[in-house]
Amino acid sequence: MDSPASDREILTWELNGTACRTLAQMVADDGFVPDIILGIARGGLIPAGAMAYALDCKLLISLNVEFYTGIGETLTEPVLLPSLLESSGLTDQRVLVVDDVADSGKTLKLVNDYCEQQGRVAEVRNAVLYQKPHTITRPDYCWRTTDKWINFPWSAEGPVVDRRV
C-alpha cells in the first residue's frame, strides 16, 4: 500500500544535483581523496557518477547488491550479485563507497566487509544522500537524515516492463 506524500521525502532531479555536489564538497573539505568511487547498484550509481565528476575521480566502478524487493520490503539480508569487479584492483586504494540511502545499513556493511576482505585496501569510506536514524552503519558523509520513505527521481515511477511474467 502506498504511503501518503507527507510520509515521503521527495528528491527531485534538480535537488539531486545539489545534494551530490554538496556531498562531494563534504568529502573534499574532509581531505579525503578517493582513488576509486564504488557505486552500489542500482540506487548509488547516479550519485556515484555525479560525485566522480565533482571529485575528479576517473575510476568509477560498481557492485550490484539486491536488498529492496518493494516499498518498505527487503530480503532478510542483502545479497551481492555477480560482478566483474577485480578485487586486486582495490589493493592500496582509497575507496569511496556511494549509495543513495543507508536505511538498515546492512548493504553498506556488506560492501565495506567485501572491500576489506579483498586485501590491502588503503581506506574505505562511505557517502550517502540519505541515512535513516536507525542505520547500523553510519556513513562518513551524509547529505540528509530522514525517517521517511524516499522517492528518488530515478525510481519514483515503476518500470516500463514487467519482468515478473
Image (cartoon, rainbow, N blue to C red):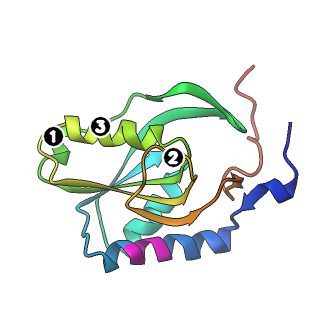
Q: Which residue is under mark 3?
A: 113
Which one is closest to the eye, mark 2 or mark 1? Answer: 2
Dot 1: within a 10 Å radius of its alpha carbon, few (fewer than 14), some, or many (20 or more) residues? few
Amino acid on which disc 1 is placed: Ser
Regarding mark 3 in the picture, which secondary structure is present there? Answer: helix
- Horizontally, is 82 left or right of 129 in the view? left
Question: Where residue 152 sits in the image (x, y, percent)?
Answer: 67, 56
Q: Residue at x 55, y 72 (%)?
A: 19
Instruction: Answer whether residue 85 is visible to the viewer in this image.
Output: no
Is residue 165 one of those drawn in magenta?
no
Dot 2: within a 10 Å radius of its alpha carbon, few (fewer than 14), some, or many (20 or more) residues? some
Q: Which contiguous range is marked in magenta?
A: 22-26
Q: Disc count in the image?
A: 3
- Horizontally, is 31 left or right of 62 in the view? left
Q: Which residue is under mark 1?
A: 88
Regarding mark 2 in the picture, which secondary structure is present there? Answer: loop
Q: Residue at x 57, y 76 (%)?
A: 18
Question: Where residue 142 sits in the image (x, y, percent)?
Answer: 48, 64
Between the C-alphas of marks 3 and 1, the distance is 15 Å
Q: Earlier in the sequence, mark 3 or mark 2?
A: 3
Between the C-alphas of marks 3 and 2, the distance is 16 Å
Residue 164 bears which disc, if any?
A: none
Regarding mark 1 in the picture, which secondary structure is present there? Answer: helix
